Each structure stands twice: as C-alpha cells, then as structure tokens.
Amino acid sequence: MATTRLIAHHITKGSTAGRTMKGRFDYGQNPLKTNDGDLVLSYECDAKTAYREFALAKAEYHAITGRKQKKNEDVLCYQIRQSFLPGEIDAEGALKIGYELAMRWTKGKHAFFVASHIDRPHPHIHIYYNSTTLDCTRKFRNFNGSVWALRRLSDRICIENRLSYIAHPKLKSKGKYRHYGEWLGANRKPGFKERLKTHIDACLANIPQSFETFLQAMQKAGWEMKRGRGGAISFRTEGQERFTRLCASTLGKGYGEDEIRAAIEGCATGFGNVPPRRKMSLVIDIQERLKAGKGPGYERWAKVFNLKQMAVAVQYLQENNLFSYKDLEAKTFEITERFHTATDKLKQTEAAMKRNAALKKAIVDYAKTRPVFEEYKAKKYSRKYFMEHEAELAVYRAAQASMRELLGGAKLPKMDALKAEWRRLAAKKKSGYAEYRAMQKEMREAVTVKANIDCLLGRTGKEKNKEMAR
C-alpha cells in the first residue's frame, strides 16, 4: 500500500537558491539513510552535484526565454515522497519503483534523482526533480489535481508490481481526519519533552533540598545535563539527538529554571501543568434571561457557568485569606480607594503634561510672531500693515494671552526646562499607567467577587441598590 505526497520547494527566507537546494538534497542523500549512497539513482544529473546542475538549468532558461519569476514565487524543484507498508517490499525494490514513478511522472523531460531511506520501519523513497526541463525552454506546471494524478500513477505502478494500494481513499469532506498522535491513541509513545516533564515532576515530588540536589536527581534518573551559553541548562536522555533546554518557552509554564527554583524554595504555589485561575465574570441572572426568551439549553449552560464563577470566587477568597464577609468588604473598599488614588495621580500628571505642551506651543508661536508685532508697533499701528499681517498678529495676541493664563503671573521658564519637565512627566505617566492597570485589574476582581458573593448570600434588591447609590 503506497502513499504519495508532492511538495514544491521555494527559496528559504534569508538563503539562496543553491543553499536551499543543497540543504534539501543533503537530507535526501544522507549516507546513514541511504546505506552510504548505495540506495541513490539519478537521471540526466549527478546526485552529488544536482543542486548546481539544477541552478545552471534555471540560468539557461532565463537566458533563452527571457522569463524570470519573483524570487519568493519561483519553484526551485519538486519532491515526491512515496511510502510502502513494512515488510511488503525491501529498500532496493522501493528504489526501482520510485525510479519508474519519477520517469513516468516527468516523461523523461526533467532531471531527477531518487533516494531510498532505511531509517524507518516502512520503506520509503524521496524523488527530487528539476522544475526546469532538460532543454531549458519550459517548466513543470503544477496543475490543479496533480496530487490525485500522482496518486493514480503510483497505484497503477503498485498494481503492476503486485503491491497493495488504497482502493477507496476517504476524502476530507467525507469524514473527520485525525492527526498522527490521535490516530495512534493509547499506542502513542510519550515524546522526549513529555518524558522530561514527567521526570521533573517526579524529582520535585521528592522535595529536593536545593536546586543542585534536583539536578543530581535528574542525572541519576538517566538524563544527561549540560550548561550552555549564559548558564542555560539542557537535558538529554538515551536515544535523543539534541538537548532540550530547561525553560518555560520550550517545556511550558512551570518548567522554567526560575520556577523550579521557586518551587524548591517553597515560594511557588505549584509547578507543572497547574491550570491558571479562570477569568472572573459576574454570575448570570438566569430567571431574568428566561423571561427574556432564553430556552432550556441556555439555562443548563448558565447554571454550569455560575457554578464555575462561584468556584473562582471561593478560590480568590482562599488566596487572599478572606474568611468573613467583613474582610471581603474591607478588602474591596481598600482596593477601590487605592484605584481612585492612582487614577487621580494619573489625571494630575496628564493635566500637567497638557499645560506643559500648551505653554511650549504658546512660547513658540510668540517667538515666531513677535518680530511682526514689533514691526507693526514701529509703523505706529498702521492699518495697512495690520490688514496685511492680520493672521500673524492674531496668533501673537493668542499666544500672549495663553502664556498669561498658564503662568498666572509666574516667571516664564526656559524652553530647556520645559522639555526636561515634559520628559519627567512622561516617565511618571508611564509608570503611573502600569500602576493604574494593575490596580484596575485588582479592583475589578474584588468587585466581581463581592457581587457574586452578594448574589450567593441573597444581598440583592433594595440593599444592593443602596450600595450602588452610595
């Protein structure tokens, strides 16, 4: 049963056509996978220099036809992967069938080479063929439905060689496709990252005395450790080629070095796949929604939603050690007051920045239009001069009035001092906004939890309206 796949290779971002093809071809001709190159066949090219020959053919195509595609749209070469059932055919037989498939697919008009790999239990071959024809006058057209045409040709060759094939492949539109891991189900072996996370959890469960003790326990469990640039720690186990770095971006939240150190020192609330707290929301008044026309399905969903929100509220109370309603009220009042204080500070800073900007604009306008006013004054307030420079004189008077209003009789500061003040206020505003957002989030959580607890205790109606009025 042979399966096929057709892949078009473009230039890799940040690379060249030659380097891109060489990287692809080196993978196909890997000596460890092709029995030191014995399982490689070529047509009208040398497999070892195929990337240069393909590039030369493209240069000749451009010279002959004058056609040149955009760099990111040009197809360098095509690759065909053909896989067979384990035990149905050997690597040499797969190589011969792959060569026949390539010859009949390209009709002998494109240079190609075929490599048969033995690194997997199932025999499979890789075909790389040039997108440019041998006479350098045309290119392979990846037509609509080429994948199905390739599959039919592969099935025909398999039938001719008495090999199995998929008679009725299921279309994506005819059923749910599953990815490889889901298809394997319980037979799927855990990956190296999953195994590493499992051993980290096991070592932390033994409560190591220090981070060094934790590393020693990992090494005893069969994990090789190394320290890279900047002291980064990586692990590798038997059968693994590359090291896996100990960081949250690689293994997930809770598995970074700092988080593991915190867990060992007792500073963390937990480690591993600990689910984060669910987003807080107000509970739903189900009866009001049912009166508005919602149905039984919505009622069931709303009940589950309200239960989850109550669980989040209880978690919040436990995390903040709020064991009485008075404590919750005091906490909510305190957070709200701090939020309003942070808001007032931010507004004062923004008002100061607005005044600073207005004063700088007035000073600039005043300096630009003062010579016009001095000339107007020297001409003894000539009506003709006024008519010619009415706009400039209006700007001058507006700037003068603005400076008097903003300064309030104080001395006019220098422009450098105003710019320095602006930088100081901008930095203050930036830090103030960070505090404002943190306080806003904290206040919303506290107010939402209190509202949900009020709903649970039945503190609604008149009592709730009095609170809202206050």
Image (cartoon, rainbow, N blue to C red):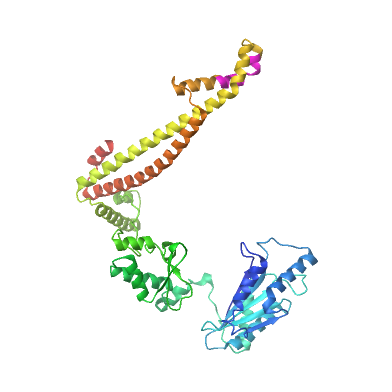
Residue 85 part of the magenta-drawn span: no
Q: Position of residue 288 (x, y in %)?
A: 31, 48
Q: Residue at x 52, y 29 (%)?
A: 415
Whether residue 320 sits left or right of residue 276 in the image: it is: left
Query: Toward the viewer: 151 or 102?
Result: 102
Whether residue 74 sits left or right of residue 463 in the image: it is: right
Which quarter of the rendered picture does the N terminus lie within?
Answer: bottom right
Question: In the displayed image of the protein, which residue is found farthest to the right?
Answer: 64
Is residue 416 placed above or below 191 in the rendered structure? above
Q: Where is residue 403 in the image (x, y as percent from the top left)?
A: 49, 22
Is residue 88 placed above or below 237 in the rendered structure? below
Residue 392 part of the magenta-drawn span: yes
Q: Is the magenta stretch mostly helix, strand or loop?
A: helix
- Please identify the quarter of the rendering in which residue 196 is found: bottom left
User: Does the rendering let one see residue 251?
Assistant: yes
Is residue 368 placed above or below 19 in the rendered structure? above
The magenta-colored residue range is: 385-396
- Please identify the quarter of the rendering in which residue 17 is found: bottom right
Q: Which residue is drawn at 62% across and 14% down?
A: 376
Q: How many marks?
A: 0
